Amino acid sequence: MPGGRDFRYAASGKIGTMTEQQDSPAPVDGLAIAILGGTGDQGRGLARRFAIAGHSVTIGSRSAERAEAAAAELGAPGIRGMANAEAARAGDIVIAAVPWEGHGKLLATLAPDLAGKIVVDCVNPLGFDSRGAYALPVPEGSAAEQAAALLPDSRVVAAFHHVSAVLLLDPEVGSFDLDVLVLGDDREATDLVQALAARIPGMRGVYAGRLRNARQVEALTANLISVNRRYKSHAGLRITDI
Amino acid sequence: MPGGRDFRYAASGKIGTMTEQQDSPAPVDGLAIAILGGTGDQGRGLARRFAIAGHSVTIGSRSAERAEAAAAELGAPGIRGMANAEAARAGDIVIAAVPWEGHGKLLATLAPDLAGKIVVDCVNPLGFDSRGAYALPVPEGSAAEQAAALLPDSRVVAAFHHVSAVLLLDPEVGSFDLDVLVLGDDREATDLVQALAARIPGMRGVYAGRLRNARQVEALTANLISVNRRYKSHAGLRITDI
């Protein structure tokens, strides 16, 4: 495969359309979702959307009181707040939506609580300066690989990097024009997270490779921020021909 | 801007539709295109499409004879072949479509020929093993930043990383469902390359940040290869909400 241009496959199999995905019973039906760092914009936004989709959702925070207040404020049925460790134990699928700065320390602390669970990392290690956003170096390669290194007994998946918190929290926004890139080394886990993404109207979960290729998906958020600045948009990605 | 989620802009300005872009005279009209490493699949594919769009195109190769043969074989009007140095001098916009292995050495050699020109780097530094493609480390950060370091008198732009060579060369394919991400630090140069991308039917050129954010755009090709394997597709990207 010279030059990295391995696009030599006949176009044939397609993944389901949004309608098909939503008409079929998703394998995530009935699974409890927990969101670590769930009082941030991204965490609250995802909590709101998964609650609307019918999931039981637990927001985790360093402070149980702040988590409870955020849950109450969201006002969607089925959302509750707890301290991060209790939230981690309450979820079948646990989403890490914490700031990059505290990512490794929090996950290391919660490793016993997260054992056996699917952990979805949506953290973007970015820095900002006067010229905009840029990717920060991560010794493990990516936030998701750092999570996998710290959580050897969990099934780590990377997803939801490019979803706008503003749109997730906007009650006027009913549907989203974007695909969620889902990465991981455990097929059953990535399948479940793809189905979870499809619970939010308009979104598709698209398998996009192994964890070793998570770095560029996290870092691409810097490019989407550049797009947003140039075009005054809330840019998202769609993958074509699937 | 905590957590790198800076999507806080009102949706308003949109870039032109494909039809608008093609109806207006593009600022690239009449510019000569040269393609270094133009005898490879990607180079020949781009040469063919830009020739069809009405540009004079010069294919460059280490061997002038091989370049001439490739140009003749493509059979489109306005394509000729030359040795890389002569091709570089013949182009107003020079596209580097060489294998990553020889990228730095070739550009260093051609620096005098490329002075003052817009150099478009579309090289993806990827490795392959039994699990698929992965991003190779690049000391300068990215192939595009390596080009910029080696070509201080050129205007380096990164673009065309995700375009399928197979589709470019397929005479049955008239239109493409993908956006070309265009990165660079020189606004006039990125504007021109965006317009160049729009010369290929269906493609849009979308500004996606500065060269310091090129690494993840190059590396994302590894993810598209994973998508292609999973879904049996020729995957491309579209940016939504612009």
Image: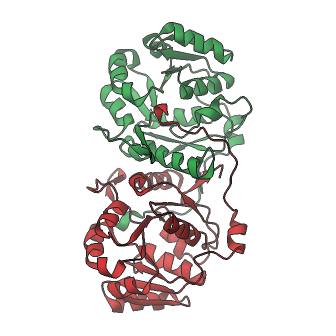
Chain colours: A green, B red
Q: Is residue A50 left or right of residue A190?
A: right
Image location (x, y in percent) of residue A89:
45, 13
- Which residue sits at x=40%, y=91%? B68
Give the quarter of the image for residue B102. Answer: bottom left
Q: Nearer the viewer, residue B15 or B101?
A: B15
Image location (x, y in percent) of residue B62:
30, 84
Give the quarter of the image for residue A157. Answer: top left
Q: Is residue B174 left or right of residue A42?
A: right
Where is A228 relative to A76, above or below? below
Total numbered badges shown on the rendered structure: 0
Q: Residue furthest top?
A: A65
Q: Is residue A82 visible?
A: yes
Image location (x, y in percent) of residue B24:
70, 73
Q: Nearer the viewer, residue B167 or B230?
A: B167
Where is B156 relative to A15, above or below? below
Q: Is residue B238 left or right of residue B112?
A: right
Image location (x, y in percent) of residue B239:
59, 52
- Which residue sits at x=56%, y=72%? B196
Q: Nearer the viewer, residue B137 or B65?
A: B137
Q: Nearer the viewer, residue A163 or A132?
A: A132
Q: Residue furthest front?
A: A130
